[in-house]
Every structure is written in structure tokens, then in C-alpha cells.
Amino acid sequence: MSFFFLYYILVSMKYVYLMMSLLFLVSCEYRKEIEDYNYLDNNSIRFIKIGNDTELLINKDDVFYLIILDNKNSDIYYDYLIDMNSISSININNIIFNVNDKIEILFDDKKFCIYKKELDRDNYSDCDFIYLYKIDDDFYITLNNNISVLFYDAYSSFNYRFMYMLSNVWIDSYTIDEYSYTTLTLKDNDYEVSSYKIRGKTIHKKEKT
């Protein structure tokens, strides 16, 4: 093998290695951007499911509200902690939290409703979004086409009666599990739901300024 031929091979391998390294760096940067679960868009609600419990994190104008439905399990940053087990109604910075025949969160002229068996009176006609929290075999609520999105825990088992109700309405549905983070973002008169697998140990920590 001649010296020039060997030199040509070494130079070629160098350029191939350089190109592969650049592609790897670009792909990592892109993944960081779209899967950065330490960041939460404005006007967003994020589901944080840990075991059997789910917490909700809201970002409104860079103020963070952590909503507890049963027990507090997460260790993340928040400005306000709202325990829905100990309030009936509260208004914080024009976000209204109500507990009556269901749990309601009102912000940006939208109503986010949470089904909880202990509260349910099957009154969801004015809800824009519904999260079904810890349903059982007898679960049933009435749905209508005014509801935009239905959220429910992964591996939920619906009975035939509710499945029939669900098949007769046009509602987007998304599952919530502890291995991914799902986020509802309100955008003017529209909304966006995103879900990514959790690849790290934290779900959200506010950056220090």
C-alpha cells in the first residue's frame, strides 16, 4: 500500500468523522429544543402524574401555579400552591379555582374541568376541557360536542355505556401517564396539546434570572 493511498484514506476518514460529529451535535440541539421538559409555555397546563396521583402545573405570564388534586408528590418550582382539597373558590391573578360539583379552573376565558368521583353531579356541558381523574367501573358522564379535549389516565377501562357516549361526539382525547409529560397550551381562540417522553429527572424548574 503506497503512502499517498494511505494518506488519502486517513483524510477521508477524518472528514467522515467530522460530518458525523456535526450531525450528532445538531440532532442533540434539536432534541433539547423540542423535548425540554424544564420549560413550560405561557398559558399552559402541564399534567404531572406520579404513581396514582396527578398534579397540574400552570404557567400564566411567568407565574407558576401547582394544583394538588390529592397528595403533593412532586418537587418542582411554583409561585402558588393550590390544594383543591381545602378550598371552595379562590381567584389569584384572574385565574379562578372552584370546587363544587366538579373541579374548575378558569383562565383565558376557557374552563378546564376535572372529574372527581366524590364531587361528580354530571354537569360538564359548559366545560372546554375535561380531565377524568381516577375513574372506576361505574364511571359515566354526559359529553357534548362543545368539549374540545378529553384527558384520561393511561390504561383507564371505560364501560360500554361510556364508550357508546364517546363514540357519538367529536372530541379529541389524550392519555396521561407518568412516563411522559402532556401539556395543554391555549393560543388565542385555539389550543395545542403536546406530549413527550420524560428523559430526565425533573419536569419543570423555573430558570433563575
Image: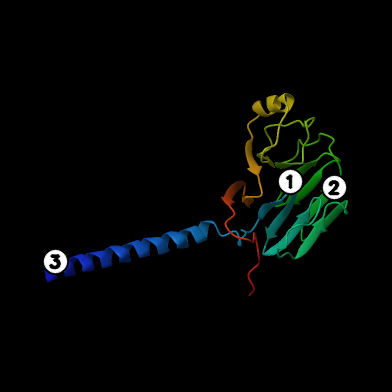
Q: Amino acid at mark 3?
A: Phe
Q: Which mark is residue 124?
A: none
Q: Please tell me whether mark 1 sits on a helix, a strand or a loop.
A: strand
Q: Which mark is residue 5?
A: 3
Residue 17: % across, % down: 31, 64
Q: Please tell me whether mark 2 sits on a helix, a strand or a loop.
A: strand
- Residue that badge 2 annotates: 99
Between the residue at mark 3 and the residue at mark 1, the CA separation in whole angstroms equals 71 Å
Q: Quadrant of the C terminus?
A: bottom right
Residue 129: % across, % down: 70, 42
Residue 11: % across, % down: 22, 68
- The residue located at (72%, 32%) in the rendering is 143
Above or below residue 151? Residue 88 is: below
Q: Quadrant of the N terminus?
A: bottom left
The quarter of the displayed image where residue 172 is located: top right
136 lies left or right of 129: right
- The residue located at (67%, 64%) in the rendering is 62
Looking at the image, the residue that sits furthest to the front is 1
Which one is in front, 160 or 165?
160
Q: Nearer the observer, disc 3 or disc 1?
A: 3
- Residue that badge 1 annotates: 111
- Kindly indicate whether the residue at mark 1 contacts the one at mark 3 (C-beta within 8 angstroms): no
Between the residue at mark 1 and the residue at mark 2, the CA separation in whole angstroms equals 13 Å
- Density class for disc 2 (Cα within 10 Å; few <14, some 14-19, many ≥20) is some
Q: Sequence order check: which comes first, mark 1 or mark 2?
A: 2
